[in-house]
Image: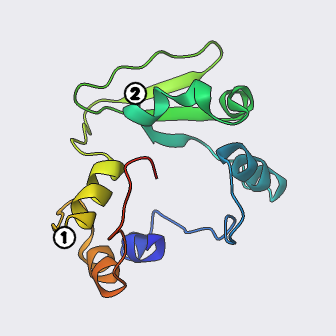
């Protein structure tokens, strides 16, 4: 789905560094990228997810290894942990989270937040039909 979403935009390159069925924590991915010589320049994250950063596996290492670009969400507030390098992206102001998109898909609703190719893929593969909000 990432390849479908990025197919028409040459600014993006899709990595397969997380392929497989094993659980992958963000810090593991960041360390794999660094080991492959592809250190991330920044971690793009919604304000709602960033608000929970201190609950992440090895979150202090994540904070030490990357800069964050935090995308504003209406009604979301967050605290910046000590040492975190945060750049806010308030003008983007996405009014919907990925959890809300998945909830809508599970309810059989369509969502304009998705590229058409991704929405078609999700429908054709019957994905997110049994979505649980904490997934």
Q: Going by the image, does 121 lie left or right of 50?
A: left
| Up/down of 56 relative to 126, above or below | above
Q: Residue at x 67, y 71 (%)?
A: 19
Measured as percent of width and height from the top left, residue 95 is found at: 21, 41
Q: Residue at x 26, y 39 (%)?
A: 92
Observer-side mark, 1 or 2, equals 1
Residue 96, by quadrant, is top left
| Residue 105 left/right relative to 122 | left
How are the colours assigned in the image?
rainbow
The spot of residue 33 in percent (x, y) is 74, 55
Q: Quadrant of residue 48?
A: top left
Quadrant the N terminus occupies: bottom left
Q: Which residue occupies the foreground of this view, 14 or 96?
A: 96
Measure the C-alpha gap from mark 1 to mark 2: 33 Å
Q: Which mark is residue 88?
A: 2
Q: Circle 1 is placed at which residue position?
A: 108
Q: Position of residue 89 (x, y in %)?
A: 35, 32
């Amino acid at each position: 789905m990432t390849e479908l979403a990025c197919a028409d935009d040459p600014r993006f390159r899709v990595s397969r560094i997380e392929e497989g069925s094993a659980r992958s924590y963000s810090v593991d991915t960041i360390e794999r990228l660094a080991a492959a010589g592809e250190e991330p320049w920044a971690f793009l994250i919604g304000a709602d997810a960033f608000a929970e950063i201190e609950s992440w596996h090895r979150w202090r290492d994540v904070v030490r290894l990357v800069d964050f670009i935090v995308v504003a969400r209406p009604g979301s507030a967050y605290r910046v942990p000590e040492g975190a390098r945060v750049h806010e992206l308030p003008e983007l102001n996405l009014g919907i989270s990925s959890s809300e998109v998945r909830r809508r898909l599970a309810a059989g609703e369509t969502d304009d937040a998705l590229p058409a190719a991704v929405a078609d893929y999700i429908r054709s593969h019957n994905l997110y039909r049994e979505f649980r909000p904490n997934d």
